[in-house]
Image (cartoon, helix red, strand yellow):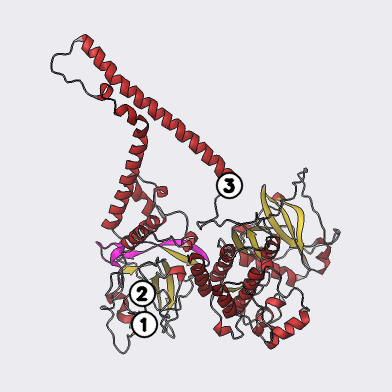
Amino acid sequence: MLKWSESSDYVRRYRALESDGATAPSTWSMYPSVLPRVATSRLTLYNLTITDLSSFAVQALAWDAGLVAINRSGVFAWTQVYVKRQSDSMADIAATFDSFVTSPSQTTRECVGGPNGKFLRQERTDYSTFSAKVTQCAVELVSDVPDGASAMFAQDALSSTAVPVLLLRRHVGPNINETNMAIHTSPNFGRWPWGECPSPSQPSGLIIPCDFDLKGVYLPVPSPAMNVWLNDISTLKQSMASTTTHTPSSSIANTPSTLSPTPATRPIEDSDATNRSAATLTPVVAYIGGALGLLALLLLLWCCRRRHRRAHPPPLYFEPFVELHATPKGLHAPARPSSARPAYSFRCAPPSAHPFPALDASNLVLHLNPSKRLDFDTIERVEVLACASLTSMYFGYYCDRPVAIKGFATSKLHEINQRHLDAFTDQIRLMASFNHPNIVALVGFAWHNHPQSLVAVTEFVSQGNLLEFLVAHPGLEWTNKARLALHIARALQYLHVMLCPSVIHRDLTTKHVLISWPYAKLSGFSVSRHTHEEDSADTMTAGVGSGMYMAPEVLCESGQYSVAADMYSFGCVLVELDTQTPLFATANSTSVLLELLNGTRKPQVSSDCPDAIRYLAVQCLEADPSLRPSAFDVARALEAFIQQP
């Protein structure tokens, strides 16, 4: 059995990966940025702060303290893992298949893959003995966590270069009333269905089952490996500080007449004492002068760096910055109105006044999360950015922050009914549940006395939508465009996998992807729905979305949406990324829709498209939804394309 097959010593593993030059996974950026004191209080013993640690060391420190990320209703948080034996560290919590005794009621599945050539996954389980005989850890049982829908116990089959990504998942036993928690470690939060083996090419990490009985459990003890790592970081920090401090006076230190001590072979007379004092004072003054000079230099460098940071804000989360051959064009924020009163500029239609019905308890507006409600008077609408049939999108400000503001068009208020208002309210509620760097963030919502004045306030993304961006910057290389595609795939992965229940976008187009170079952010959630709403004929059936991007099964009159429909739309986006022209721009839309429905026409990439991207687009555009890749598969393929030499 190989070293990591049944090992939870992620401190040593992360340190080895860092030493081998591994890259920190971008999925770590989704974890909470602040570690609880149970982890950070340990740093004071080594005169360290969290900023002294690398990404790998931070994750190792969190693990060693028993902290594992958990996705609760779409929001990541740290949760505490406990050990069952008082002397155990987190390196001791991995379960072994030797303790998982097979029987007719307890079986395993042998899978092919990994460095060892094969590995085991749990299949049937005897729950009457499982917790007592197999699990070595315990966690709180929580219900607002997506069902892992996977094995809850498996050996590690990752390559020596793969970086484990740790996430606590909930497991509901198939056809039985049993719930368990398990720590998954596959990269990119990957998971595979219970009762199946991943393909040999799929990275499959260790799965550590945990009990949920918190009686008689303990906090994990600090591991010696983490102590050594922190001590090495502290020693290196002190060494660098010492080298920096003494460097300016190195020339003085080499002057024997100044620093060489005078042997005291006879009683010191006054004149000797004076000379010795002078000799001793000279290097002291030199040291002080050198230190002051160094301090002034460091202060100057700090000021320059601070000024540079203000002028060049850092990326939203760590990812290699991509240089664009053409300077990205941005949306210049409209001039701020000189008056303190909001400056409404209605380009769709002239403003008109209509009476509003009063609020009552039946309005869903009153049931929105009150923590997201904003003061209506702090919102300024400056200029219209876009118009739809009933709504308008404005550029504006919220408390001096540039934002985008969506609300009902004033000229259409007489057409607004309760159904329209409920749909807009549902969109706000849905967006309030999102927390992902590649999804446009909801700042909040507000209304003024009447429900028709309801507005949704989101972050302002300065460079417009992806279609405009591609047209404005012709000839972009795929080395640049692939990262934008990856960001979209990650957003879909979050919606389809990380949220519980899953969310189907239903209208993925290049117009609903916003650009803040070098990042892409998914928007346009007006027709998005949770998968549990599929029983409602008017929410999950065909006819919703942008026709050219609709999957064939959706174009059918009785078609139904699924996450696979989003992946078809993603294939269309890949085609537009490649050609940098609108989809079927010169064709008659009605005839195109008929050809798409009949299967006689498909979006096509250009002849210059890289083979990996071409293959990915073809897969996404499969007529059979079951043959399309998942968002996870697409993200992994794009990451491989980006990382290739």
Image-based side of 535 in relation to 113, left or right: right
Find out whether the residues at labels 2 and 3 contact each other: C-beta distance under 8 Å. Answer: no
Q: Could you tell me which secondary element the residue under label 2 belongs to?
A: loop
Image-based side of 230 in relation to 198, left or right: left
Residue type of the residue flagged with mark 2: Ala
Q: Position of residue 320 (x, y in %)?
A: 51, 57
Figure quadrant of residue 239: top left
Residue 495 versus residue 55 in the image, above or below = below
Q: Could you tell me which secondary element the residue under label 1 belongs to?
A: strand
Query: How many numbered marks appear?
Result: 3
Q: Residue at x 82, y 57 (%)?
A: 346
Find out whether the residues at labels 2 and 1 contact each other: C-beta distance under 8 Å. Answer: yes
Q: Nearer the viewer, mark 1 or mark 3?
A: 3
Q: Residue at x 37, y 54 (%)?
A: 39
User: Which residues are the magenta region?
Assistant: 73-94
> The N terminus appears in which quarter of the rendering?
bottom left
Residue ID for mark 3: 312
Residue ID for mark 1: 111
User: Residue 598 has which mark?
Assistant: none
User: Residue 157 has which mark?
Assistant: 2
